[in-house]
Amino acid sequence: MVRWFTLVWVLEERSSPGSFEELAMPLFDRLYNFAHWLTQDRQEAEDLVQETYVKALKGFSSFRPGTNFRAWIYQILRNTFFTSRTGLKAAATVPLDLEGDEPILPAVKDTPESILLQRSDRQIVQEALGRLAVPYREVLLLSEFEEMSYQEISATLAIPMGTVMSRLSRARRALRDAVQQLQGK
Amino acid sequence: MGCEEWTKKLDAYFDGELPADEARALDEHLRGCSNCAAEGLRRVQQKRAVAAAGMRFTADPAFRVRIQKSIAAPRPMLWSRRWLPVFGALTATAAVLIAGALFLNLQGDRRSERQLVSELVDQHVATLASANPVDVVSTDRHTVKPWFAGKIPFTFNLPELQDSPFALVGGRVSYLGQSPGAELIFRVRLHEISVFIFQERGTYDGRENELARTVLSFEVRSWRHNGLHYFVIGDASAQDLDKLSELIKAAG
């Protein structure tokens, strides 16, 4: 009997918002950071995070346990962003070559670039990231900072794996160019 | 394959996304080609620079509290109103249902346990096949343990391995059912052993406190202690796994 009651309790526990809090709150700092990177504004970032949590909590019953919660909530955040005024504006200034299928840019082998990048400090990289088009910025952050796999990025951005790879490659190149510009080369 | 072809694979290689055989081939090429090695170094440096620069914005603590409050809900009571009708119906056929529930629970426990162990065996194999099997590379437990601080919601003790055949290789953050945990890699002779540590609530609700079995020729040991669930998985001998498990248990 006790066992059955436990089962009933577990079922209720799993469908309760308590589980949502346990999954969602550990991601708060990173979600806020990501939101701020997207919006470039503290107030807008707060609004975006708040809306994300509200939408995620409301839709939590549609989240399938065992699938990737992090990718799911990041997807909600960026979908919310791209339907906001700032997001629509950002989407309208997407570089033309973003989804092109031309081959990945060949590597640049000159040593001065390597040295420049090595010397570039955190502030310059942050400024360069801020100058990138939002799709480049977000894919770089998801890969390098959030350490998401290509599969997770693909799920978060709702784009095929091949596009993840080509977009990442272009984003890395764009960042390198931005760093060089900031360093006055 | 020419350098141009190799460099196209560098990003996937450093992102840990290249298949194991291609990663090994590229690894060999990098050892012998200074141009590609220099390009590889540049890309790693850029990856690290972005990773370091990524954490830039911190939320106002008051905003965090506001969000936490908005999503927090009181812990559900054992007998909430919506279960009462269910209980009413149950009382009529209590004996049959209890027997059925107990049986299903037992089966469920076994299935969950098998599924979980098999998932961890997969993770162990994937780790060994990875170009970057560990995120913190160190044989020093005083380096590995602090590395996990802030990355996982618990802490654990690592054993003193002096005078034992085991060596610590390093560690990485692992996930099970969306809960973060620690994966530690130990080496004994030519074998590598993964030790997974997760919070007990993130794993299955099985009855068995301790587990020792063989899955696909991998030895598996598991136990619970202080709210944590430990899994030791490797292709070393059963004695080696027992010995390592004892050392970890002794460390508490």
Image (cartoon, coloured by chain):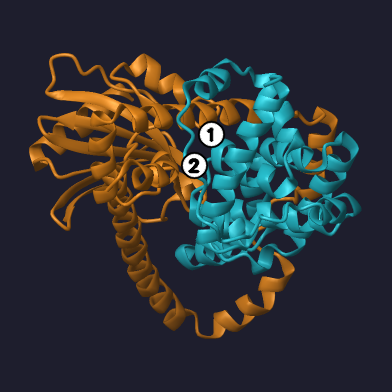
Residue A41's place in the image compared with B139, above or below, is below
Question: Residue B232's x, y, as percent?
Answer: 25, 41
Instruction: Report which colour depicts chain B.
Output: orange
**Are callouts 1 and 2 both on one chain?**
yes
Mark 1–mark 2 Cα distance, whole angstroms, equals 7 Å
Mark 1: which amino acid?
A: Pro
Give the residue at x 85% y 56%: A88
Q: Write down the residue under mark 2.
A: B180
Q: Position of residue A96 (x, y in %)?
A: 72, 56
Name the subunit of mark 2. B
Of the chain colours in the picture, the one used for chain A is cyan
Instruction: Identify the residue at horizontal 8%, vertical 41% (top origin).
Output: B237
Closest to the observer, B35 or B73? B35
Circle 1: is it few (<14), some (14-19), or many (20+) Cα within 10 Å? some
**Mark 2, residues whose alpha carbon is within 10 Å: few (<14), some, or many (≥20)?**
some
Q: Which chain carries label 1?
A: B
Q: Position of residue B125 (x, y in %)?
A: 26, 49
Residue under circle 1?
A: B153
**Where is residue B35 shown, x and y percent of the image?**
35, 29
Nearer to me, A25 or B205: A25
Task: Examine the rendering and report whether any part of residue B232 can be seen.
Answer: no
Q: Is residue A24 left or right of residue B159?
A: right
Element at label 1: loop
Q: Disc 2 residue type?
A: Pro
Residue occupying image coordinates x 57% and y 26%: B49
